[in-house]
Image (cartoon, rainbow, N blue to C red):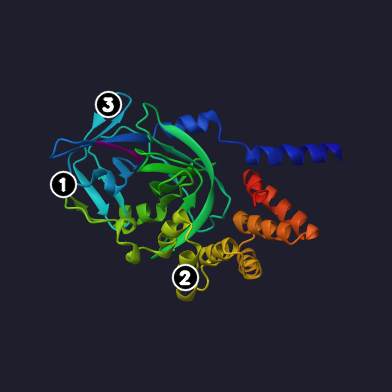
Amino acid sequence: MKNFLFLLFFFSFCISATPTPELLFKINRSVVKVNVSTKEGNHGVGSGVVVKKDHIVTNCHVIANAQGINVNKYGNSYTPHAIIADWKNDVCILKFKYLELEPVKFSSNDSLEYETKVFGKSYGGNTVKAHTSFGRVKGIHKLNNFKVIQSSAWFAMGASGGGLFNYEGELLAITTFKTAGNTAFYYSMPVEIIKKMLTSGKETSVTAQPELPFWDAPTEDQPFFMQIIGPMKKKSWGALKKITLKWIQKSPNEIEAHYHHAFALYQLGEFVSAKNFLKKVINKNKKHALAYLYLYKISNKENQEDDMSYYKSRVLELDDSLIDQGNET
């Protein structure tokens, strides 16, 4: 029995451990720095990931309005001769003639769950070496036929076009944009877009006229998961309540609509209604750590010790880094 318990503990430890240095080193070989020059003489830096022989994916906003593009790795410089562009989703694939770099393996987001551990690889901050950041999946947002991934794996300027990977080293998404502020949200575009582009995308010149990505559209034209960012940053809880109510009416099965509506209600002191919406969230998604966190906070305010104990245990199980927030008023 003791041996069984030891093996169970050892197995649990192994699957929750961080990626091995060997895996991180292997991923490094497929993550590149993308350098861009414009007609005005300006220079920009982004990141890219090798996704196929002679193909590197990056974000379109990295190369928009570029006069020259080159990719650097291990002292070598490569220049693309064409691109495959999905400007609206902000995903561009650079095509090369002789690119001696190893492509990554793709994952699938069909069964991706909240709180899945992930790590990002990019040249955020214009670092000399690819930087690694660790986090978890915190949101999965439907956009057209794809799923935009929100994670806590932070990234900085220069990380656009980098990779978001699972702990098996498979590419989940491309790190694309973040919100401003200390409590930023980090969003990545899924590999399903890349797969579709590789099979049916059309080539165009590297100097093709760009279009604005969805996240840079006027606020009223943005998806709801982006419209809520402004009110949350400004702590305009009444405005957040109105937007999320519209979101629920348009997409009644959208988990994040219910969660952020509950969050607004909590901030407004409407704890009973907030609790009802939070319970809807966990009924649909047993791994929504933030929903459990706010149920814990409400039960704390209501002095419901049994509920407090249960919700706290769920938060600790899913993401123990959140529990300190539960002790705040």
Residue at 56 percent of width and 32 percent of height = 20
Q: Observer-nearest residue: 166 or 311? A: 311
**Residue 287 on image: x %, y %:** 62, 56
Disc 3 crowd rating (10 Å Cα; few below 14, some 14-19, many 20+) is few
Residue at 76 percent of width and 38 percent of height = 7
How many numbered tags mark residues here?
A: 3
Point out the tag, 1 or 2, that comes first from the N-terminus.
Answer: 1
Q: CA distance from mark 1 to mark 2?
A: 42 Å
Residue 242 is tagged as 2
State the extent of the magenta-drawn residues as a range. 44-49
Tag 3's secondary structure?
Answer: strand
Query: Which residue ends up furthest to the right in the rendered image?
Result: 1
**Residue 279 on image: x %, y %:** 65, 67
Residue at the disc numbered 3: 76
Query: Which residue ends up furthest to the left in the rendered image?
Result: 39
Residue at 78 percent of width and 61 percent of height = 304
Residue at the disc numbered 1: 207
Q: CA distance from mark 3 to mark 2?
A: 53 Å
Dominant SS in magenta: strand
Disc 1 crowd rating (10 Å Cα; few below 14, some 14-19, many 20+) is some
Left or right for 195, reference 255: left
Asked whether 66 falls inside the magenta stretch, the response is no
Residue at 50 percent of width and 49 percent of height = 151
